[in-house]
Image: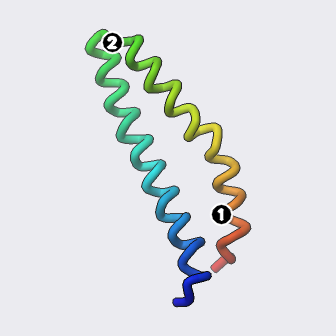
Amino acid sequence: MPNSDLIPALLCKLNENQLALEAAIMELTMWVEQQGSSEVGGNIRGALDVITQNEGFIKVSLKTLVPPE
């Protein structure tokens, strides 16, 4: 596989990892909030909002880079 083909595949895998980490962190956030730390939970949710805000742009960009199968 040429290096130019690796970049879109790498970006797809990195995006998948990012979304998996977001899901895991959200699970921990819900647990923290159940323990009574709503302020900490709110701070975490605020940080995770960046992932949500950027997700649309990332998806569109990946569709441009990755040819349909």
Check disc 2 and give the amino acid type: Ser
* Nearer to the camera, 37 or 2: 2
Q: CA distance from mark 2 to mark 1?
A: 37 Å
Check disc 1 and give the amino acid type: Leu
Residue at 67% x, 76% y is 68
Q: Residue furthest left?
A: 35
* Nearer to the camera, 9 or 34: 9
* Residue for badge 2: 37
Quadrant that contains the C terminus: bottom right
Question: In x, y percent, where is residue 21?
Answer: 40, 45
Residue at 56% x, 32% y is 49
Q: Is residue 42 above or below residue 50?
A: above
User: How many numbered badges does the structure rendering display?
Assistant: 2
Residue at 57% x, 73% y is 7
Answer few, some or many: residues within 10 Å of disc 1's Cα (few below 14, many 20 plus, some between 14 and 19).
some
Q: Is residue 38 above or below residue 61?
A: above
57 lies left or right of 27: right
Q: Which sits earlier in the primary sequence, circle 2 or circle 1?
A: 2
Q: Which mark is residue 6?
A: none
Quarter of the image holding residue 66? bottom right
Helix, strand or loop at label 1? It is helix
Helix, strand or loop at label 2? It is loop
* Residue for badge 1: 62
Quarter of the image holding residue 31? top left
Residue at 46% x, 18% y is 42
32 lies left or right of 10: left
Question: In x, y percent, where is residue 48?
Answer: 50, 33
Q: Residue furthest front?
A: 3
Q: Is residue 11 above or below residue 30?
A: below
